Image (cartoon, coloured by chain):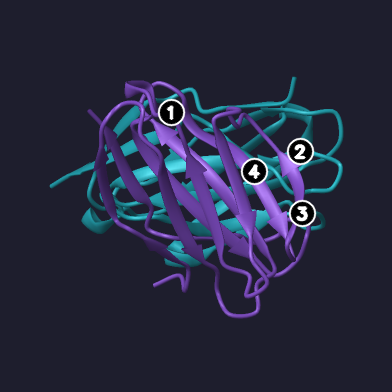
Chain colours: A purple, B cyan
Amino acid sequence: DSGVTQTPKHLITATGQRVTLRCSPRSGDLSVYWYQQSLDQGLQFLIQYYNGEERAKGNILERFSAQQFPDLHSELNLSSLELGDSALYFCASSVELKNTEAFFGQGTRLTVV
Amino acid sequence: AQSVTQPDIHITVSEGASLELRCNYSYGATPYLFWYVQSPGQGLQLLLKYFSGDTLVQGIKGFEAEFKRSQSSFNLRKPSVHWSDAAEYFCAVVVNQAGTALIFGKGTTLSVSS
């Protein structure tokens, strides 16, 4: 158990819908990262928050957004969902801003039908 | 552009045999280097990391990796593979200036035969 909690574990939704994925980082970790894992693209970095502020952005679509709340949990919002958004979404956390050791959650498997 | 290459998509090794998984990176400076393992249905677990210093690093579960600057490589090794090592292995690099974004290779699936 990495200490990073992601909910829900599985999510099935229809095209055009909006979903919210939730991540609780390890106790004391200030950085939260979101990754998308798909068969064709592999593991892709989406976005990083540190202590409530966005600090790095990767290949995140405009239809996707994230935030980190004062209690340090984070949410990834995916809207206008398409079939191609079906993937495993991972959250990771680390103590520092610099990613010297990130701990990953077990992921949320999103299926868009 | 920065990238991480894992040339082997799938490797099969006999139980008890040695293992080497290859990783090459493309980056100007010395990056932070990582190996992660992902078991089916699980998240990623950090095996080991290299930032600087001794180029041979030891990790968990009996794994080690060697950083070779001249070859831009960071290969993962294990002297004797156990059936429980069957999983997908990812090499990753932290490349941005702030040292935050992990860039992953495509992964190598390890199968262990008895």
x, y percent for residue B44? 44, 54
Decide if residue B99 is on the left or right side of residue B37.
right
The residue type indicated by label 1 comes to Ser
Question: Which label sits on residue B95?
Answer: 2
**What is the secondary structure assignment of the residue under circle 3?**
loop
Q: CA distance from mark 4 to mark 3?
A: 22 Å
Residue A39 found in image quarter: top left
The residue type indicated by label 3 comes to Phe
Question: Which label sits on residue A80?
Answer: 1
Say which quadrant the N terminus of chain B sits in: top right
Which sits earlier in the primary sequence, circle 3 or circle 2?
A: 3
Label 4 marks which chain's residue?
A
Residue under circle 3?
B51
Q: Is residue A3 above or below residue B23?
A: below
Label 2 marks which chain's residue?
B
x, y percent for residue B60? 48, 66
User: Which marked residue is nearer to the observer: mark 4 or mark 2?
Assistant: 4
x, y percent for residue B8? 42, 25
Q: Is residue A56 visible?
A: yes
Residue under circle 4?
A47
